[in-house]
Amino acid sequence: MMAGTFTRAAFMTALPTDIRALAFDIFGTVVDWRGSIIREGLALQQRLGADWATLPDWPALADAWRAGYRPAMARVASGELPWTNIDGLHRQILDGLLPRFGLAALPEAERQQLNRAWHRLAPWPDSVAGLTRLRRSFTTTTLSNGNMALLVNLSKHAGLPWDCVLSAELIGRYKPDLEVYRAAARLLGLAPGQVMLVAAHPSDLAAAHQAGLRTAYIPRPDEHGPGGWMEAVGTTPFDIVAPDLGALASRLGIA
């Protein structure tokens, strides 16, 4: 799916006028998880010294780590795993991947440091300025599967200017469970239709739409690397499509 390739049915032309809050997906929408994980891996490799100089393929490890995210959450949702937050799931996935990438002997302290790379993700170039503009007119919040500690640390690291931080961890469920979206509106004291989910992932937006939220699609064509995979748009309409958060602010009438 190429960025910017939409049918006319993929978005609505009439902008919503009753939005009070903007809730943001984080991984891939606001922050560059892949580039950040690769940089963290290269820094780890440098710390480890010459014996590790040719290992591993960090882009492939980053992709494989992220690919384990949805299956791990599905195991929690099905009851196969008890409630486990994203830090815990990330660690389980990482431990399973390290032998494949030549890192079976990675010390425990380095495993912990690498797992916490998700707390240190860098924002996309438009994120901080775009959020700052959007916050002038709307309540802004995270709405992520990331756990609270992760989201707070990430936001401080990246300088993301939220009014509040909301996590699926607060209700012990993961998106795309519809109750996560409804709970966000409830916690903000708003009707679902007064909250707009901003995300780079059509499936997330489709679930939010089903839960009664409004939706804004922000394609991130480099989320999986230049020319990488993008999730298909599907048939669920979006209220707004914008190339970045600055453009979203302009579409919502913020100077």
Image: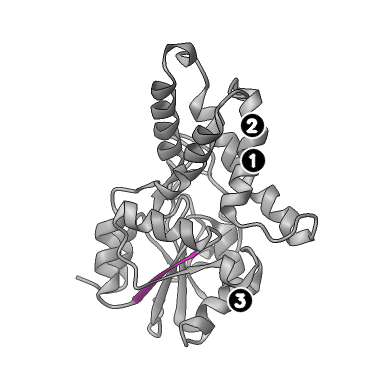
Whether label 1 touches label 2, CB < 8 Å: yes
Circle 3: is it few (<14), some (14-19), or many (20+) Cα within 10 Å?
some
Q: Position of residue 142 (x, y in %)?
A: 44, 66
Q: Which residues are magenta?
A: 139-143
Q: Type of residue at label 3?
A: Ala
Is the magenta region chiefly helix, strand or loop?
strand
The C terminus is located in which quarter?
A: bottom left
Q: Position of residue 40 (x, y in %)?
A: 41, 34
Q: Position of residue 157 (x, y in %)?
A: 33, 52
Left or right: residue 90 versus residue 71 is left
Could you give the CA–CA distance between mark 1 and mark 3, rounded to whole angstroms?
A: 30 Å
Look at the numbered disc 2 and give the secondary structure of its residue: helix
Which comes before the other along the chain, label 1 or label 3?
1
Disc 1 target residue: 93
Q: Does the magenta run of residues contain 37?
A: no
Circle 1: is it few (<14), some (14-19), or many (20+) Cα within 10 Å?
some
Could you give the CA–CA distance between mark 1 and mark 2, rounded to whole angstroms?
A: 6 Å
Q: Type of residue at label 2?
A: Leu
| Image: 75 above or below 195 | above
Look at the numbered disc 1 and give the secondary structure of its residue: helix
- At x 49%, y 63%, the residue is 148
Which mark is drawn over residue 97?
2
The N terminus is located in which quarter?
A: top right
- At x 55%, y 58%, the residue is 202
| Image: 131 above or below 219 | below
- Give the image quarter of residue 134: bottom left
- At x 42%, y 41%, the residue is 222
Could you give the CA–CA distance between mark 3 and mark 2, rounded to whole angstroms?
A: 35 Å
